[in-house]
Amino acid sequence: HEITVGDLARQLSVKAGELIKKLMAEGVMATINQNVDFETATLIASEYKYEVKSNLVSLDDILSSKKDAYESADQQERPPIVTIMGHVDHGKTSILDALRKAKVAAGEAGGITQHIGAYSVEKDGRKVAFLDTPGHEAFSAMRSRGAQVTDIVILVVAADDGVMPQTVEAISHAKDAGVPIIVAVNKIDKPNINLDRVYTELTEHGIQSEEWGGDTQFVKVSALQGTGLDDLIEAVLLQSEILELTAATDVPGTGAVVEAHLDKGRGPVATVMIREGTLRVGDHVVAGTKVGRVRAMTNHLGKRLKSAGPSTPVEIVGLSEVPMAGDTIDVVEGERQAREVAAWREEQAAAMASGKSSAASLEELLSKVKDADTPEVPVIVKADTQGSVEAVTEAVMKLNTDKVRNRVVHKAVGGINESDLSLAETSGAVVVAFNVRAARGLDEEAEKRGVMVKYFSVIYEIVDALKAVMAGKLPPIQ
Ligand code: GDP
């Protein structure tokens, strides 16, 4: 009986980062994809429930009864959900647009594509869903709210530019989330490109192409000329077969809010990616803490739908207020249950906000940490030069013993940026900053989000500090 931290966060509708911090306080170190045992999960769940007022329904109960339904329901193959990431100007938006133009309009004649935040394409009767906000910011923002909707990441690397800082960030985010990567080498129409250089640089970051004996699919494309797009879809479908993605369709729908806004005429409008089950017009839903009833549902072509199944992006109207991107949306029995769940979630959020402490201190970590099977300290290394990045990483990795290990989830030259914080938040990593500072305002932000940032200018100090964190991860001596 185990549950991943991400799933637990989703069930409790709290931020994964907050949950990780909470787990830390209980002496359990786990990243978003790691399992916690049933006992721990129950303990944490009970803490989050606080004193549930008797008139409020616990979402746990509803979700666990739904889970039974899910488990007994027939599982069917479902389309993969893809996010496109990569360095700025490498062609993420161009690829999204080219795919939409080539595959959507052609497939469903008469439709005018609407930008609703997600769309799906079809090839030989098989579908692929794309999240329309490229970049790891959206990816990690959703993840930190507990909604990991992405099955596959397409990493766009411009053939004329190669691996750049945000390429590396994207790799780290995808790896930490445990999401497989497909590389789209873009702009191959340009003169004077050097594909070998791109392949070599990616190999240096642990992404090796199948042609070179690795296990990552590389697809050469030109978004500008529309070449290679079919191959890219093929690669996604192949990866999806390997992942054996399935979902139950014949159960009440559940999904994630991808985008939401207030429309003058229609009221709150939300784009939802359905994860499991079926969403129908007329369903009562709770999206985060907002309630409503699905009044109308349209797809990315503006076509009205009565119902929609797993991996389908839909735009819905009928919510009373605008939810947030990353909120989970669940079908509930009726209006009363919707209000009760919403009230329950609000109460939790308020309790969380008031009880929220400042950033974890080393001492805090130390005093409480004991752990599980493979104690691991996730670490993000930021330093002033490539040489010092390597030196720090080496120092960090040298500390590994057979009982406890450091895992470098990301390393790069430069100051601490927003991407580092979101990665630290979702992975529970300690940020080790060597001769660099955080961007303006990010120290406070780190504290708010419970991210531990340690500044150093001498390597042996890092060693001492990390040894202390690692020691804390060892089980107490009996
Ligand atoms: P994003 O920042 O990653 O979303 O990149 P964009 O899609 O905005 O593209 C950045 C620039 O690269 C734009 O000027 C595009 O026209 C150009 N571009 C994108 N794809 C290609 C391509 O395949 N070939 C060439 N030559 N230019 C491209």
Image (cartoon, grey):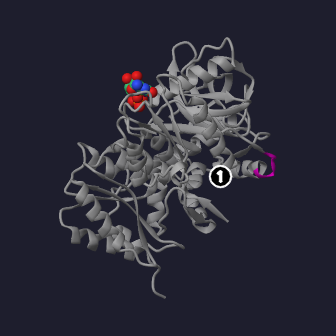
**Count of picture labels:** 1
What x and y, as percent, mark residue 264? 51, 14
Residue farthest toward the front in the current orientation of the protein: 192
Q: Is residue 73 left or right of residue 19?
A: right
What x and y, as percent, mark residue 21? 44, 59
Q: Which residue is mark 1?
A: 60
Which sits in the foreground, 315 or 301? 301
Q: Is residue 183 left or right of residue 77?
A: left
Q: Is residue 365 magenta?
A: no
In the image, the segment drawn in magenta is 71-75
User: Can you say whether 366 is above or below 251 in the image?
Assistant: below
Q: Is residue 445 left or right of residue 105?
A: left
The structure residue drawn at horizontal position 41% and vertical position 78%, both measured from the top left corner, is: 401
Quadrant assignment for ligand 1: top left
Q: Quadrant of the N terminus?
A: bottom right
Which sits in the foreground, 303 or 390? 390
Which sits in the foreground, 151 or 474? 151
The structure residue drawn at horizontal position 74% and vertical position 27%, both measured from the top left corner, is: 307
Which sits in the foreground, 265 or 260? 260
Q: Which type of secondary structure does the marked residue at label 1 adopt?
A: helix
The structure residue drawn at horizontal position 50% and vertical position 32%, both measured from the top left corner, is: 221
Q: Is residue 72 magenta?
A: yes
Amino acid found under the numbered disc labelled 1: Asp
Label 1: few (<14), some (14–19) or many (≥20) C-alpha neighbours in 10 Å: some
The structure residue drawn at horizontal position 64% and vertical position 48%, both measured from the top left corner, is: 59
Whether residue 58 appears in this view of the structure is no
